[in-house]
Amino acid sequence: MNPSTLYLVQSTYHNTPNVIDELGNLYQKGDQIIFMGDSVARLSAEMIQQFENVSCLSIEKDLIDTDTLTQINVLDYDQFADLVLTFNRCISFK
């Protein structure tokens, strides 16, 4: 199991900047962030540049502009499930 933390961000569109600010205080090298739902539509390259491992689900990638998408790992459901199972600690932001 991975000793790092997996962060699942499912916040509203308007609350996503607040969640990213909070993640900036918590995130450590080796952690992984997955943006899901409305939070994906709010992402920008500037917002996530401080994080090393950022992902989203493949069905939501069309909500992201091209510049931001180059900084994000796009996961299909199988990859998402495999990733979740590698972490022993997961924190969800809604």
Image (cartoon, grey):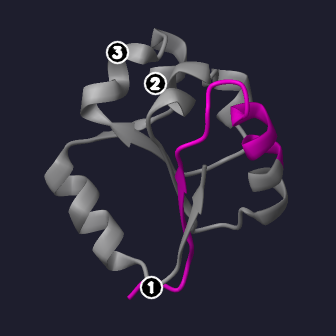
Q: Quadrant of residue 31?
A: bottom right
Where disc 2 sits, the SS reads: loop
* Residue type pointed to by label 2: Thr
How far is the residue under mark 1 from the one under mark 2? 28 Å
Residue 2 at x, y percent in the picture: 44, 83
Residue tagged 2: 70
Residue tagged 3: 62
* Residue type pointed to by label 3: Asp
For the residues bearing labels 1 and 2, Cβ distance under 8 angstroms: no
Q: Nearer the viewer, residue 91 or 27?
A: 91
In this picture, residue 45 sits left or right of residue 88: right
Q: What residue is rendered at 57% in x and 73% in y?
A: 5
Q: What residue is rendered at 31% in x and 65% in y?
A: 83
How far is the residue under mark 3 from the one under mark 2? 12 Å
In the displayed structure, 74 sits above or below 78; it is above
Q: Which numbered mark, 1 or 2, is in the foreground of this view?
A: 1
Where disc 3 sits, the SS reads: helix
Q: Give the extent of the magenta segment.
A: 1-21
Q: Which mark is residue 88?
A: 1
Q: Which mark is residue 47?
A: none
10 Å crowding of disc 3: few (<14), some (14-19), many (20+): few
Query: Which quarter of the rendered picture does the N terminus lie within?
Result: bottom left
